[in-house]
Image (cartoon, grey):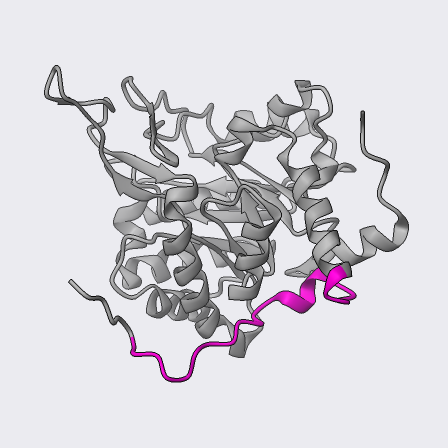
Amino acid sequence: MSEKALTAAEKQQLAVDFCGLSFATPLVLLSGCVGFGEEYTRVRGFSNRDAGAVCLKGTTLEPRLGNAPHRIAETPDGMLNAIGLQNPGVDQVISGILPTLDFGETRFIANVSGSTVEEYAEVTRRFDDSPIDAIEINISCPNVKEGGVTFGNDPDMSARVVAACRAVTGKPLITKLSPNQTDIADNARRCIEAGTDAFAVINTLMGMAIDIHTRRPVIGNNQGGLSGPAIKPVALLRTHQVHQACRPHDIPIIGQGGVTTADDAIEFLIAGASAVGIGTALFYDPLVCDSINRGLLDYLQRHQLASVSELTGSLQLHQNANSPCACDT
């Protein structure tokens, strides 16, 4: 039996402002998990309207075939992927895919990648002359040999990529940060200086799975990006750390990494996110966004909060805690 439609008041409670864009809910469907925005619309009961925005699949200047198989492997509480940015190239995305999307359903965010700073800038420039709502700069993909995480782990290169993209577009820029770096907050500060409008925190963690019978990696690329509930504690900490750099500048964050329930989403909001990314959970339950939205509303009612935005950055740290790490090993 289907749930009753949300009331106007409930919709208002879920709505958020993100870089001047109105999101109907704080949920964002993550790049690489929903193709180019139309795949899940074939699932009965699924609607892009349940999300505030949809991030399209990573796009490069020229078409890419991606990595050799196997590209995906399940792990305890997560999955590894090494797709390798398979895509038809930016011109085909703009001319052949964007016209098929219903921009009245939700916001659509392009995800741009490249092997050089110049390629990032050119892909961004082409999306600037399109109906896309915002552009996500993917400087943190661990599954390509050039660009991606190579840029994302170097603050100087991160800033160069952001500055180059900023110079060719007036659309909101969202920089997707890698967790595989020493000081993510410092990288965020550099990207803010270079002109980013927002962040997506975090991309996948690098990982490996081994076939004990062949003694070879399961993934054809040898390593892949780990996502799912297993990375949530890391993602929460990184979101909190980046929020410290963003707070003085009023820079919003899409917090992501292992979100499967409303409680997970609330944790990210409290840690400092303004919106929350949903990725791997969609593979297990394509209708998860509706249940998360309703769980958020239930929490707001129980805690007498008027808006989901009231949760953002409301974390209260223990004052007597050791920092940055008090691990017993």
Q: How many marks?
A: 0
Residue nearest the viewer, comparing 307 with 144: 307
Viewed as shown, does residue 15 lie left or right of 128? Answer: right
Residue visible at 37% across and 68% down in the picture: 185
Q: Quadrant of residue 321?
A: bottom left
Where the C terminus falls, by quadrant? Answer: bottom left
Viewed as shown, does residue 191 lie left or right of 263? Answer: left
Residue nearest the viewer, comparing 87 with 25: 25
Residue nearest the viewer, comparing 273 with 129: 273
Residue 313 point in image, percent of width and height: 56, 70
Residue 246 point in image, percent of width and height: 49, 71
Residue visible at 80% across and 25% down in the picture: 1
Residue 198 point in image, percent of width and height: 53, 60
Q: Is residue 185 above or below residue 50?
A: below
Q: Is residue 134 above or below residue 84?
A: below
Judge whether residue 326 is colored magenta: no
Residue 109 point in image, percent of width and height: 59, 43
Residue nearest the viewer, comparing 142 with 227: 227
| Extreme-left residue of the structure | 215
Q: Quadrant of residue 291?
A: top right
Q: Is residue 211 visible?
A: yes
Q: Is residue 272 above or below residue 171?
A: below
| Extreme-bottom residue of the structure | 320
Residue visible at 74% across and 61% down in the picture: 302
Judge whether residue 318 is colored magenta: yes
Characterize the magenta stretch by its predominant secondary structure: loop
Viewed as shown, does residue 95 lie left or right of 163? Answer: right
The magenta stretch spans which residues? 302-323
Q: Is residue 131 visible?
A: no
Residue visible at 22% across and 22% down in the picture: 218
Q: Quadrant of residue 73?
A: top left
